[in-house]
Amino acid sequence: MELRHLRYFVAVAEELSFTRAAQRLHIAQPPLSTQIRALEEELKAPLFERDKRRIHLTPAGQHLLDKARAILAAVDEARHETRHAASGEVGRIHLGYTASAMLSPVLPAVLRRFAAAHPSVRLMLQERTSLDQLDAVHARTLDIGVLRKPEATTPPGVVLEQWLESPLVAAVPADSPLAAKRALRIADLRDHPLIAYPKDSGIGLYWKVQALCTQAGFRPQVVQEARDTGTIVGLVAAGIGIAIVPRDTRCFALPGVAYQRILDQDATSSLHLAWREAGDNPHAQRLLRDLRAARKAGA
């Protein structure tokens, strides 16, 4: 069954006249009649009842009319969307993000503005660890990654660009002596139990915290590990230990938790943007420009 057969059939079914249908289709009537008979033979069902004055749809013809209209509408829609996709008007972006990136007001604001400005572009968002994002960008399952740079080799063809730098803070139990200080240094955490991200989780903050403690001359006493930042803050509220987290984590304002500024100059963590050097998604390039503009604007 060919699409032209369906178009011919719909024209005849709607006009209930081979003459008017042929005029509508800009073809001669005999070839139209031949095509309709060929369609009936292929389907092994009569589609029209014919008499000398007029034609009528059979039950099989009425059923086919509903299906044919739906098929032709779907084909027209696919054609329309493909043309718009080729012109850059519609499409999708696969964007990965590390969980802590969504705690910053910047990324959600950029995504909200982008979605409002480009309603025909679908944002496919995936929460992934930093290592997972690097692999996914390299494998072309992500267009853009928003991550914290891990201590790992960047895959070939993947570009990493520093985006937002944020201070780190110490989340401490509210009844801890550390909570009474005006500010802390990493060295002040030497003898305190630490809640940390697991090393094998691929979360970029793990290596930063380890490096800060090493620079301060001690090895952290990790008593509990958790992958989720909210869980880490909850463990601090339970008095299990302290944690070094991005400043935006303060949005988790749990009772029993105090956030302390860290004075060490290196106590910062940066979010990076990752994308393929040879990326061919024009929508992703547009979003990258918006993300860079937000970095310069500070929001």
Image: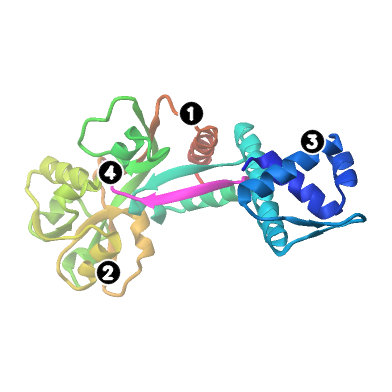
> Where does label 2 land, which residue?
257
Q: Which amino acid lies under the numbered mark 2 shown in the image of this protein? A: Val
Tell me if label 2 and label 3 are in contact, CB under 8 Å.
no
In this rendering, the label closer to the viewer, 3 or 4: 3
First-in-chain label (3 vs 4): 3
First-in-chain label (3 vs 1): 3
Report x, y in % for residue 161.
38, 32
Q: Which amino acid lies under the numbered mark 1 shown in the image of this protein? A: Asp
Residue density around tag 3, few if under 14, some if 14–19, many if 20 or more, within 10 Å: few
Q: What stretch is highlighted in magenta?
A: 116-132
Give the CA distance from mark 1 to mark 2: 46 Å
Give the CA distance from mark 1 to mark 4: 21 Å
> Where does label 3 land, which residue?
31
First-in-chain label (4 vs 2): 4
In this rendering, the label closer to the viewer, 1 or 2: 1
Residue density around tag 2, few if under 14, some if 14–19, many if 20 or more, within 10 Å: many
SS for callout 3: helix
Q: Which amino acid lies under the numbered mark 4 shown in the image of this protein? A: Asp
Report x, y in % for residue 266.
25, 40
> Where does label 1 land, which residue?
280
